[in-house]
Amino acid sequence: MSAQAEEVTTVVDIVKLVLSPILVVAGIVAFYYFSDLLFLYRVLILMTIISAAIGICFTTARGRSVWGFVLESKQEFHRVVWPTRDEAFRTTGLVILMVIIVGFVLWLLDTFLFWGVQLLMNQGVK
C-alpha cells in the first residue's frame, strides 16, 4: 500500500462527517414515520438517503483515503495466486484426514489416561 501523509481535517470535512449519520438516522425515522406509503417507495427513499450519506462521507479527506485503500486492496486481491480446484480438494482432504487422525490419537490418550487413573484409584478392579 502506498504511504501517504496524514491529511489535515478541515471544518467542512467535520461537518460532512457529522451530517452523514444524521442523514441516516433521519432516513430511518422517515421510513417509519411515513408508514402509510408503499413499502417499496419507503425502501427506495431510505436507500437513496443512505447512498447520499455515503457519498458525502467519500467527499471528505478521510473518505478519499478510505476509497484509495479499497482500490489498492482490490488490486492486491487480483495479484493473489489462487489454488487450482485439484489443489483445493487435495488440501481439504489432507486437513480432514489430519483432523480424524488427531482425534483418534486424542481419544486413545484419553482412554489410556482414564484407565490409568481408574487403576491407581482401585476402581478398575472388582
Image (tube, helix red, strand yellow):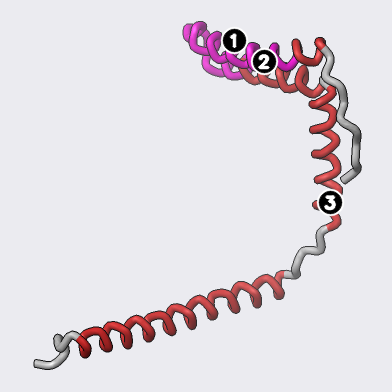
Amino acid identity at mark 1: Ala
Amino acid identity at mark 3: Glu
Q: Secondary structure at mark 3?
A: helix
Q: Position of residue 52 (x, y in %)?
A: 73, 17
Contact check, label 1 and label 2, Cβ < 8 Å: yes
Q: Which residue is mark 2?
A: 49
**Quadrant in the picture for residue 91:** bottom right
Pick the front one: 33 or 96: 96
- Count how many numbered circles sit on residues in the image: 3
Task: Let me know if residue 38 is in the magenta part.
Answer: yes
- Front position among marks 1 and 2: 1
**Residue lying at 82% horizontally and 11% vertically, measured from the top left:** 12
- Front position among marks 2 and 3: 3
The disc placed on residue 76 is 3
| Magenta highlight range | 16-45
Amino acid identity at mark 2: Ile
Residue 17, above or below 104: above
Q: Which residue is mark 1?
A: 26
> Label 1 vs label 2: CA separation?
9 Å
The earlier-in-sequence mark between 1 and 2 is 1
Q: Secondary structure at mark 1?
A: helix
Residue 76, above or below 48: below
> Label 1 vs label 3: CA separation?
37 Å
Contact check, label 2 and label 3, Cβ < 8 Å: no
**Residue lying at 66% horizontally and 19% vertically, measured from the top left:** 50
> Label 2 vs label 3: CA separation?
32 Å
